[in-house]
Image: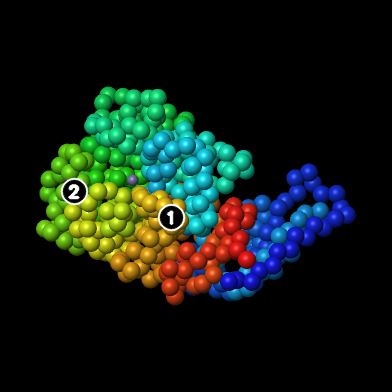
Amino acid sequence: MVKWIVFVALVVGATGPLAAAEWLELRNFKLFDGTGSEPREVHRLVVKDGEIVAIDEADDEQRPAPGEAVTIIDLDGAFMMPGLIDTHVHLANWPMARHELVNRLSWALDHGVTSLRDLGGDARVLAEIRRAAELGELDAPRIRIGAIFGGQSMFNHPALAQASPGMAPGQAPWLREVSGEGDVSLMVAMARGAGVDALKIYGNLGVTRVEELVAEAQQQGMMAWAHATVFPASPQDLISVGVQSLSHAPYLIWAGVESLPDDYGYRTKGPWDDIPPDHPGILDLLDEMAERGVVLDATLAMYRDMTRYRPAEGIEWAMQAFEWGVTVTRLAHERGVPVSVGTDAFFPPTLFEPPNTHVEIRALVKDVGLSPDQALVAATRNGARAAGLDELVGTVEVGKRADLVVLGSDPLSDIHATTDIDWVIFDGRIHRRPER
Ligand SMILES: [Zn+2]
């Protein structure tokens, strides 16, 4: 247990400005800043109105003015890392009461997950909750919203039909069927108007339509994320038209297949025994991803643990997919592809367990063979890049927002320590403090 003290020093006397700045000063900890550099001892990190303004600089300007309060916490040598970022969640693709979702978002923050990339759900719910969080009405991680844009038959799936109550499946701005003649710029603009940050290019689309969508997303200042199996477009096609991330490492197998199926339903029928992860077509794809900085949202643990979420029959392929995906993720990392931490199954069967984000981090270490510091960079800096949040968060540096997790033990010696959480600072405010 970390020893800690809190001072709230209100300097009285002078007349402060109407909105006095809020200050937080964290002292004496070991900082893993997520930039890839070695952890270091830090004596003083200063946060002003949620932004990190000083780390050990002898800058006297970064101090509270008379009339401003400061909270000072001595972390007594504890380990600090950036808040974790999960790049593959579905928060609102099934009916859930608002208060239940709000509870779960606070639970995510309790467990150090400070940003989430939602890859398809009801954007109305997510945008409203995001606004409420920005107004300080509730505590929720940063949420980046992806809209599912897919081809014919994609929206027959009941899970997708549930994510747009009141609208026909495939006709909602955040769940859009785009195989017909519709006006692509209007559809992208409607998604943007619904609060969406990125298109998730999903399934059953050809390369021409994908190219049009990605270009339109860029034009309108949005990102383009893709599922690795947008048949008949190939993974190579997706990279060459400029998508910024690919989800699900096992499906990269389709970069080694001569002719692709034209239906997304075949994605799970990869020739796992016939095409090795180091097939030349796949290595070329990885090199192209590295060159362009395309993030691999690997989602490995979900395949291994699928029986926790679905009946066992019909998912024999999942274990093969997991093993294949582990090897291809290792190759991707070795060749310079930024790998991120995404779960797809973010919520464990009960909320007595932490979010599966921690399970995926452990899989990157134990199965893929990344070192703990590489896995933490995947869960922070690489995640921020995938979510388009890299100017705000993902590393602990001056100028970034203060999303910070303080641990009671060192994850670089045992990766399980990512769940040994004492403090969570979100956007410069204390969300969780140690139990005493
Ligand atoms: Zn998903």
Judged from the image, the quadrant occupied by ligand 1 is top left
Q: How is the image coloured?
A: rainbow
Looking at the picture, tell me which residue is in the foreground, 282 or 76.
76
Residue appearing at x 80%, y 57% in the figure: 10
Looking at the picture, tell me which residue is in the foreground, 119 or 399.
119
Q: Amino acid at mark 1?
A: Pro
Residue at the extreme right: 13
Cα–Cα gap, marks 1 and 2: 26 Å
- Asked whether, in this view, residue 378 is left or right of residue 129, the answer is left
User: Tag 2 or tag 1, which sits nearer the N-term?
Assistant: 2
Q: Quadrant of residue 210?
A: top left
Check if mark 1's residue and mark 2's residue have beta carbons within 8 Å.
Answer: no
Looking at the picture, tell me which residue is in the foreground, 264 or 93.
93
Q: Which residue is mark 2?
A: 314
Indicate the quadrant containing the C terminus: top left, top right, bottom left or bottom right.
Answer: bottom right
Q: Which residue is mark 1?
A: 355
Q: Give the class, few, some or many, for how many residues have Cα within 10 Å of label 2's Cα (few <14, many ≥20).
A: few
Residue 71: % across, % down: 71, 60
Q: Quadrant of residue 181?
A: top left
Report whether residue 283 is seen: no
Q: Quadrant of residue 250?
A: bottom left
SS for dot 2 = loop
Residue appearing at x 30%, y 67% in the figure: 367
Q: Give the class, few, some or many, for how many residues have Cα within 10 Å of label 1's Cα (few <14, many ≥20).
A: many
Residue 184: % across, % down: 34, 29
Looking at the picture, tell me which residue is in the foreground, 238 or 111.
111
Residue 351: % across, % down: 45, 52
